[in-house]
Image (cartoon, rainbow, N blue to C red):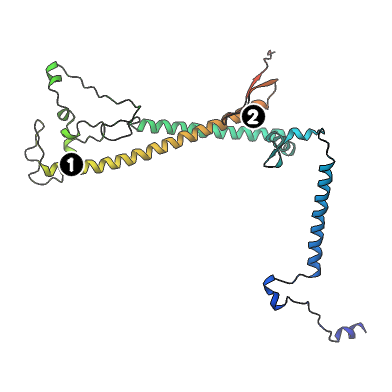
């Protein structure tokens, strides 16, 4: 009989769909969906009621040891860094935590040493560390460099020719940098015929065309030097700031390592300005 009953065609009961006029409200909620939503709503109401009762019956003088391991931040209770460290030690073990901190300290020290060497190389390569402006202008508060040239007699000192000594043009003699020599200027001038026929080391008077080319070349070179110098100083400042932040991180790791050791200690100064707190350990006589 059961097989015959299953063979008979039955009416397919369909769920009622959302009416066309209410299709903008989404899918029609079914009874099972309503149960889930109602249960969640009542659970939240019960939780809020319970919290209100606890707040009304709270004793302002009550104390829990967990208060030492948590703090309120942005209106929420959060565990302190020391509490998280102790929890981590309880999970993976104190020895594993000590090894991880030692590896972190070694890595930070290696990065600091690499940055220090890189900064030293950059400072050595930058020949004009104190000059920031072109020509003879010097920024306020900076000491201007002086180039001293020694001669044999007072007569030579009296009639000393800077342009002839540095083998450059009189217009470029007053510069402290980007002072090309005559052979470089001659090569950059294009080497046209007749331009440097009367050239001599003792006496040279460039024409207006040569001066214009030399001024254009000097201006172009000065711009390139200024851009390169600005980029180099920017990288140097960024690396110095990075090394300072790494030094602070290293100081924190060293302090944590020392605090994990044995011995009685007391805090002298709280942590401030990114620097770790300062401690003083009690002297102990070695056996």
Q: Residue furthest right?
A: 1
Q: Earlier in the sequence, mark 1 or mark 2?
A: 1
Identify the image quadrant of residue 179. Answer: top left
Apparent side of residue 189 relative to residue 45 in the rendered image (left or right): left
Identify the image quadrant of residue 275. Answer: top right
**Front-most of residues 212 and 183:** 212
How crowded pointer 1 is (Cα within 10 Å; few <14, some 14-19, many 20+) is rated as: many
Q: Secondary structure at mark 1?
A: helix
The N terminus is located in which quarter? bottom right
Residue 55: percent from left, percent from top: 81, 42
Residue 113: percent from left, percent from top: 49, 31
How crowded pointer 2 is (Cα within 10 Å; few <14, some 14-19, many 20+) is rated as: some
Q: Secondary structure at mark 2?
A: helix
Q: Residue furthest front?
A: 56
For label 1, the residue is 214
How far is mark 1 from mark 2, CA to CA?
63 Å
The C terminus is located in which quarter? top right
What's the residue at 46%, 33% (across, down)? 240
Of labels 1 and 2, the one closer to you: 1
Identify the image quadrant of residue 16. Answer: bottom right
Q: Which mark is residue 233?
A: none
What's the residue at 18%, 41% (across, down)? 214
**Front-most of residues 31 and 213:** 31
Q: Which mark is residue 256?
A: 2
What's the residue at 23%, 32% (across, down)? 175
What's the residue at 68%, 20% (across, down)? 265
């Amino acid at each position: 009989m059961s097989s015959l009953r299953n063979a008979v065609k039955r009416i397919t009961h369909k769920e009622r769909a959302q009416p066309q006029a209410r299709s903008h409200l989404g899918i029609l909620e079914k009874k099972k969906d309503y149960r889930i939503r109602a249960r969640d709503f009542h659970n939240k109401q019960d939780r809020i009621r319970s919290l209100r009762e606890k707040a009304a019956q709270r004793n302002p003088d009550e104390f829990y040891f967990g208060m030492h391991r948590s703090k309120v931040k942005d209106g929420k209770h959060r565990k302190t860094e020391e509490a998280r460290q102790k929890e981590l030690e309880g999970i993976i073990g104190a020895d594993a935590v000590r090894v991880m901190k030692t590896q972190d300290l070694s890595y930070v020290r290696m990065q600091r040493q690499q940055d220090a060497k890189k900064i030293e190389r950059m400072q050595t390569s930058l020949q004009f560390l104190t000059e920031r402006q072109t020509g003879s202008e010097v920024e306020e508060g900076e000491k201007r460099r002086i180039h001293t040239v020694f001669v044999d007699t007072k007569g030579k000192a009296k009639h000393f020719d800077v342009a002839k000594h540095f083998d450059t043009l009189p217009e470029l003699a007053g510069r402290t940098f980007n002072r090309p020599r005559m052979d470089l200027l001659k090569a950059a001038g294009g080497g046209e015929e007749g331009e440097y026929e009367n050239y001599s080391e003792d006496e040279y008077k460039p024409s207006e065309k040569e001066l214009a080319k030399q001024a254009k070349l000097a201006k172009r070179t000065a711009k390139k030097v200024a851009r390169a110098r600005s980029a180099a100083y920017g990288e140097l400042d960024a690396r110095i700031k990075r090394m300072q932040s790494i030094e602070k991180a290293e100081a924190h790791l060293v302090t944590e390592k020392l605090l994990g050791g044995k011995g009685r200690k007391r805090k002298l100064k709280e942590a401030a300005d990114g620097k770790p707190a300062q401690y003083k350990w009690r002297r102990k006589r070695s056996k």
